[in-house]
Image (cartoon, helix red, strand yellow):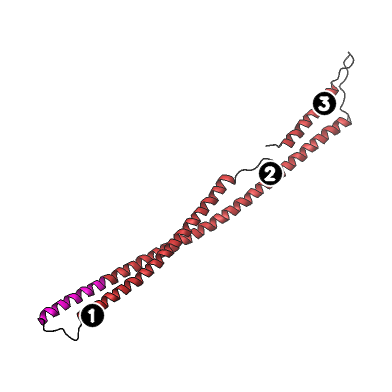
Amino acid sequence: MPSRALRRRLLLALLVLVLAAASSASPGPRRARAPKAASWEEVNVLAHGLLQLGHGLREHVERLGGQLRDLNARLAAHNASLAGLERTAAEQRDRLARAQSLFDGRWAQLDGRLRGLEARLDGTGRAGAQNNSSSGGGGADPRRDGPAEEEEDQGALQNLIRRQNLRMEELLQKIKQQQFRMDKQNLQIKSLQSKVLGGGGAVPAG
């Protein structure tokens, strides 16, 4: 769309044409005369107006081309940033999936160990009861101390649970960190998309 300066130049050229036509149609004698040819001064004025109009059009086209090049550069930069953020988000999702898989594996391993220790404790308790009943109260076997062994197994179980809890806490912290990074990347991607789709397409008037 032409700018205000360009419109003013167009109006000036039209005004020059109208004035030239009015001067050539001024009242003369009653008898008709042959049409008068335009003078060199009038031709020069018209040529100067057309030259200014051409310069104005060229400046407008150059300015519009510069704005379009700037817009294309901004869009290319936004697209590059968006592609980089999408790659980073994909990497974060892969890391989160691996951390979740590792957490599930550790949880299954801990559950298996706990079940094994429970079975050992149950077997130790039943064996101690059978020994006590078979001895008939005649005294404990010096080679096997049932309560002491059971207490040792319980201590080992508690240590195992404590270590596994620490590992699980570390894994949970890693998962939370990965999730936070993914959320941050998603917000940056949405912000860039809104900039590109919302504010990047408008070209200011010249």
Q: Is residue 54 above or below residue 28?
A: below
Residue type, mark 3 in image = Leu
Q: Is residue 147 above or below residue 72?
A: below
Is the residue marked by circle 2 packed among few (<14), some (14-19), or many (20+) residues within 10 Å? some
Q: Name the mark on residue 19.
A: 3
Horizontal side, residue 136 vs residue 55: left or right: left
Comparing 134 with 100, the one in front is 134
Q: Secondary structure at mark 2?
A: helix
| Residue 198 locus on image (x, y percent) | 56, 45
Picture quadrant where residue 51 is located: top right
Picture quadrant where residue 49 is located: top right
Residue type, mark 1 in image = Ala
Q: Secondary structure at mark 1?
A: helix
**Which residue does the numbered mark 1 point to in the structure image?**
148
Task: Give how far apart the Cα atoms at labels 2 and 3 are.
Answer: 33 Å
Horizontal side, residue 11 vs residue 178: left or right: right
Comparing 58 with 180, the one in front is 180
Which residue is situated farthest in the left direction here? 136
Give the residue drawn at x 37%, y 67%.
168
Residue type, mark 2 in image = Leu
Magenta-highlighted residues: 115-136
**Which residue does the numbered mark 2 point to in the structure image?**
64
Question: Which of the marked residues, 2 or 3, is nearer the chain's N terminus?
Answer: 3
State which mark lies toward you, 2 or 1. 1
Give the residue drawn at x 83%, y 36%.
48
Question: Which of the marked residues, 3 or 1, is nearer the chain's N terminus?
Answer: 3
Q: Is residue 121 magenta?
A: yes
Do labels 2 and 1 touch, CB within 8 Å? no
Task: Give how far apart the Cα atoms at labels 3 and 1 are.
Answer: 122 Å
Q: Secondary structure at mark 3?
A: helix
